[in-house]
Image (cartoon, grey):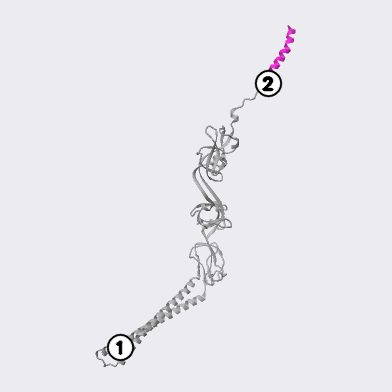
Amino acid sequence: MPRLTARVLPFLLVGLASLLACSCTRSFGAPPTASPAADVPTVAVAKAASEDLSRDLVLTAEFKPYQEVDVMAKVAGYIKEIRVDVGDRVKEGDVLATLEIPEMIDDLNHSRASIRHSEAEVKRAQDEVKRAQSVHDGTHALYTRLAAVSEKKPGLIAQQDIDEAQSRDLAAEAQISVANSALAAARQQVEMDNSARDKVQTLMDYRRVTAPFTGVVTKRFADNGSMIQAGTASQTQAMPVVRLSQNQLLRLILPVPESAVSTVHIGQRVAVRVPTLNRSFTGSVARFADKLAMETRTMDTEVDVPNSDLLLIPGMYAEVDLTLARHDGVVAIPVMAVDPAGAGVGEIMVVTPNRRVELRRVALGLETVDRVEISSGLNAGDLVVLSGRSRLKPGQEVRPKLTAMASAGS
């Protein structure tokens, strides 16, 4: 019996080893059972939302004064007093400087003397009219009496006497006309002298150089005692007194490109950012050239910006956001979620409520830098796939993950 056990035992060990080897082969050779959750991909999605979209054009321009002029004197003279300096704020009509012109005072006195002389001539002419009228009254009465007597008693008075009386009457009447003409000429001379006096007085008033509008003195050219030429002709090299700038209202001249010209209209509100001040202001389109510059294919468009506190300085640069189009309350998604499929048409992948991918063709509307309007084919709240769409197939199950960018955009 021990010998039989000794012989059988090796075979039992070999059989047991074979059995274990087969069991191990089946255990390690069989394919592993895959978890269904491991095959569902995670995709980044964005939620379609109702938004206000606008397409803006950013243009850079330099602030310019609404008005700026070099204030000139209209008469030549020496500056007697200059009342303003650089940086002074003045109102319309304020006196900036006064001139000293002695010879013009003499001209004014001469004109006044001429008026007095002409008025004396008028008085003399009036007296002459009265004298002529008196003489005429006497001669006319004499002629009338002689004519009446001759008519009642013909032959009593010689015809020659009657003719002489009539001649004297007509001569006296003519003398009245001469006196009246002299009176009219004297009165006309008075008017001419008054006109000459008014002209000199007007020039005298020009001794006061006044501000043509409310503004700020930005440069002073002359000092007390400076000789100023009359700035009445463009070809003269007359020196201005001061430079005046109207800074309470500034203007920006924007070169609007041809593609955006049709969107510009008078009264359009624009946002004006001034980088140096780190502030934004509101302006409005006040005027435009209504013609393209052939060299640049742009249209000059002027934006007025109120500056009542004079915080803005002419010469500063500003960035203007010109709104080309605006749609409020539209369904919008990120631009990266759309594959173009033609003019105004795009394709998107939507994750349905049961987490299946659905391919949709949608109509596109207004597009901004990062958002696009979906005119039809999508509702607010739908989830759209942002990236990796080439690896997905319609009907495929996915695990949507709302991204931070999509949350911020929606």
Looking at this rendering, what residue extends furthest in the front direction? 342
Q: Is residue 12 magenta?
A: yes
- The numbered disc on residue 205 is none
Q: Can residue 7 be spotted in the picture?
A: yes
User: Image quadrant of residue 384?
Assistant: top right
Q: Nearer the viewer, residue 358 or 127?
A: 358
Question: In this image, 158 relative to 262: left or right?
Answer: left
Q: Which residues are magenta?
A: 1-29
Name which residue type carries label 2.
Thr
In which quadrant is the N terminus drawn? top right
- Judging depth in this view, the residue of 88 and 250 nearest the camera is 250
Place of residue 235 in the rendered image (x, y in percent of width and height, measured from the top left):
56, 70
- Foreground of the two, 17 or 155: 155
- Image location of residue 165, percent across then percent down: 32, 89
Query: According to the image, label 1 marks what residue?
Result: 143
Residue 187 drawn at (x, y percent): 41, 79
Badge 1 crowding class, 10 Å Cα cut-off, few under 14, some 14 to 19, many 20 or more, is many
The residue that mark 2 highlights is 25
Could you tell me which secondary element the residue under label 1 belongs to? helix
Identify which residue is drawn at 73% across, 8% down.
4
Residue 126 within the magenta-colored segment of the rendering? no
Please indicate whether residue 322 sits to the left or right of residue 160 in the image.
right
Task: Using the numbered discs, state the Cα–Cα distance from disc 1 to disc 2 in whole angstroms.
Answer: 172 Å
Which is more N-terminal, label 2 or label 1? Answer: 2
